[in-house]
């Protein structure tokens, strides 16, 4: 197993409750200090186990970026989708990637729950920039 060589910084971490069925939520923004392409920084996007996610329904986590903290654009990646299994529920998930070149200095987490996805509002997702 590879050792995590990145520092965990609470100032660069966002925690957000999963949305109710058919809803979208966005987090407060964090400022990463400069535009994308930071060689030593990675984005970690993860969610807890989602036991109430309905069979075949999806929750999608994305990262949005802004130059000024007002106008937001969804980044092409990272994205993380959880889909309910045959008898409901989804395991936890996590993706890592470098901060994309097109990312502005402001980032926020966006979560979209498909209609009839079930109630996962007790669970949490995390967006963290690790340097």
Image (cartoon, helix red, strand yellow):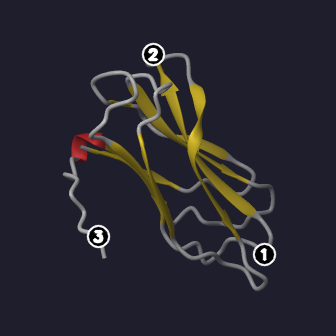
Residue 7 or residue 84, whichever sits in front: 7
* Location of residue 13 with respect to 64 vertically, above or below: below
Secondary structure beneath disc 2? loop
The C terminus appears in which quarter of the rendering? top left
Mark 1 and mark 3 in contact (Cβ < 8 Å)?
no
Residue at mark 1: 55
Q: CA distance from mark 3 to mark 2?
A: 34 Å
- Percent x, y of residue 119: 66, 66
Secondary structure beneath disc 1? loop
- Percent x, y of residue 65: 50, 28
Left or right, 58 with respect to 61, comes to: right
Residue drawn where x is 56% and y is 61% of the image: 121
Q: CA distance from mark 3 to mark 1?
A: 33 Å
Residue drawn where x is 50% and y is 16% of the image: 70
- Percent x, y of residue 105: 38, 23
Specify whether residue 103 is in view.
Answer: yes
Q: Nearer the viewer, mark 3 or mark 2?
A: 3
Mark 2 and mark 3 in contact (Cβ < 8 Å)?
no
Residue at mark 3: 2
Residue drawn where x is 80% and y is 55% of the image: 115
Q: CA distance from mark 1 to mark 2?
A: 38 Å
* Location of residue 100 with respect to 71 vertically, above or below: below
Secondary structure beneath disc 3? loop
Tag of residue 67: 2
Specify whether residue 14 is in view.
Answer: no
Q: Which label's residue is closer to the chain start, 3 or 1?
A: 3
């Amino acid at each position: 197993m590879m050792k995590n060589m990145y520092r965990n910084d609470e100032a660069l971490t966002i925690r957000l409750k999963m949305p109710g069925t058919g809803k979208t939520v966005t987090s407060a923004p964090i400022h990463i200090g400069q535009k994308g392409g930071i060689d030593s920084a990675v984005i970690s996007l993860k969610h807890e186990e989602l036991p109430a996610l309905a069979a075949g329904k999806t929750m999608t986590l994305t990262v949005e970026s802004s130059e000024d903290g007002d106008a937001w654009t969804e980044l092409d990646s990272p994205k993380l989708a959880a889909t309910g299994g045959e008898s409901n529920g989804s395991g936890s998930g996590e993706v890592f990637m470098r901060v994309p070149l097109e990312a502005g200095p402001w980032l926020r987490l966006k979560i979209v729950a498909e209609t009839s996805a079930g109630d996962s509002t007790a669970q949490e997702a995390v967006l963290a920039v690790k340097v």
